[in-house]
């Protein structure tokens, strides 16, 4: 299984953290977007293989996919995300 989406940034090099959360909400798995793709101002596809998160998140009870910026990383950054698919 994988999570696939298209992304582009206003400036390029934006780096939110992608968080998967299960129904218990206490179990989360995180990956910085920069580990998947270098965000530019052009649309590009990013894919996360969910099997890497099996030990941290119950994928059968997946309840949330979050894009999170730490306060120190915001700097007025804007990204666009489109065509989110869970396969």
Image (spheres, grey):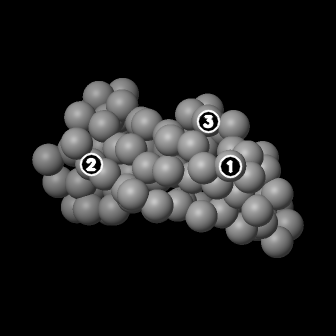
Q: CA distance from mark 1 to mark 3?
A: 12 Å
> x%, y% of residue 74?
78, 65
State the residue position of label 2.
86
Query: Residue 61: which numbered mark, if any?
Result: none
Residue that protrudes farthest toward the left in the picture: 60
State the residue position of label 3.
37
Instruction: Assign a secondary structure to mark 3.
Output: loop
Image check: 41 left or right of 29?
Answer: right
Neighbour tally class for label 1: few under 14, some 14-19, many 20 plus, Cα within 10 Å: few
> x%, y% of residue 24?
25, 60
Q: With respect to residue 23, does 35 lie above or below?
A: above
Query: Residue 42: which numbered mark, if any?
Result: 1
For the C terminus, which image quadrant?
A: top left
Residue occupying image coordinates x 50% and y 40%: 46
Neighbour tally class for label 3: few under 14, some 14-19, many 20 plus, Cα within 10 Å: some
> x%, y% of residue 5?
44, 49
- Mark 3 or mark 2: which comes first in sequence? 3
């Amino acid at each position: 299984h994988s999570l696939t989406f298209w992304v582009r940034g206003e400036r390029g090099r934006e780096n939110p953290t992608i968080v998967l959360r299960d129904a218990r909400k206490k179990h989360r798995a995180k990956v910085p977007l920069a580990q998947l793709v270098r965000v530019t101002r052009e649309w590009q596809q990013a894919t996360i293989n969910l099997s890497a998160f099996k030990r941290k998140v119950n994928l059968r009870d997946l309840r949330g996919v979050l894009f999170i910026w730490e306060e120190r990383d915001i700097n007025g950054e804007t990204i666009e995300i489109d065509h989110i698919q869970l396969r």
